[in-house]
Amino acid sequence: MRIFTAYLKKELLEAWRTKKIFLLFIIFTIFGIMNPLVAKLTPEILKMSFGDSFPITEPTSIDSWMQFYKNMNQMGIYLFAIIFSGSVNQEISKGTLIPLVTKGLKRPILILSKAIIIYLQWLMSVFLSFGITYGYTLYYFPDDKSAYPWLALLPLLIFGCFLTCLIVFSSTLTKNQFEALLVLIAVIVIGYLANLFEVVKDWNPISLVGENMSILIDRSVFVDLVPSMLISLLLSIILIFSSMLLIKNKKL
């Protein structure tokens, strides 16, 4: 347990020294500020561009949250994947794990520690952007049209767990960051394509980043995502254990 805690601290310190935490803080703070601001200013921009002849509706809190999930489910996910796609293979290629393993660090601990620290950074990023968006949305759009913002966020948090484990797995499986990123993108694209089939949609982890706006308005939709959430958690466990098996046979 002491070795596990020490390596967790090492991973956290590395995230700080490599400026990853700072980079995520900047990116997701900008997202949080932009979401309600874009929703607020879009009608004015359209009015300036097209005049009164263009039909313009008054923005609501729904428009602000729509921007939030658009940014998180598109740019946020891919930026996160790019930043962490070399988390394991880069350390292997640099040889930085050799002294740690020779001093008694178990390779499964390495995998689990990286997954925990990466997921904590995902939670920090999401909650940061969510909190800023939530505050500004209440200020700019004090309506009752977005009834369940916290419930709508839960599927995104669970998808983040799946994404984290997929990042660690792809980084353990491949030799460099570029290959890991290709694996990540391929899995995500396959997930989106699979969602075209209704029989798969209810069990697909990608569904967790597609129905957030529906849950925001109607909480009954949340129940439909329970199978996807359970599958995502199960796949996360499988990916982590697969990563542990892969790292055991990796030449450091």
Image (cartoon, helix red, strand yellow):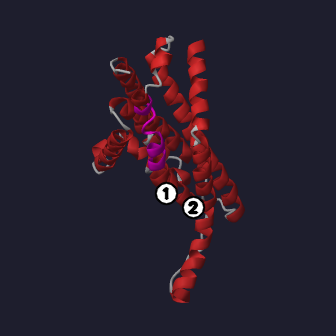
Of helix, strand and loop, which one carries label 2? helix
Q: For residue 173: magenta? A: no
Start-end of magenta stretch: 78-91
Seen at 33% across and 33% down, the residue is 174
Which of the two residues, 116 or 173, is positioned nearer the viewer here?
173
Q: Residues within 10 Å of mark 1 (few under 14, many from 20)?
A: some
User: Which residue corresponds to mark 1?
Assistant: 70
In which quadrant is the N terminus drawn? top right
Q: For residue 82: magenta? A: yes
Q: Answer left or right for 163 relative to 42.
A: left
Q: Earlier in the sequence, mark 2 or mark 1?
A: 2
In which quadrant is the C terminus drawn? top left
Q: Answer left or right for 58 relative to 106.
A: right
User: Which residue corresponds to mark 2?
Assistant: 62
Magenta: main secondary structure equals helix
> What is the x, y in percent for residue 223?
47, 41
> What is the x, y in percent for residue 41?
61, 72
Residue 1 in view (yes/no): no
The amino acid type found where label 1 is placed reads Lys
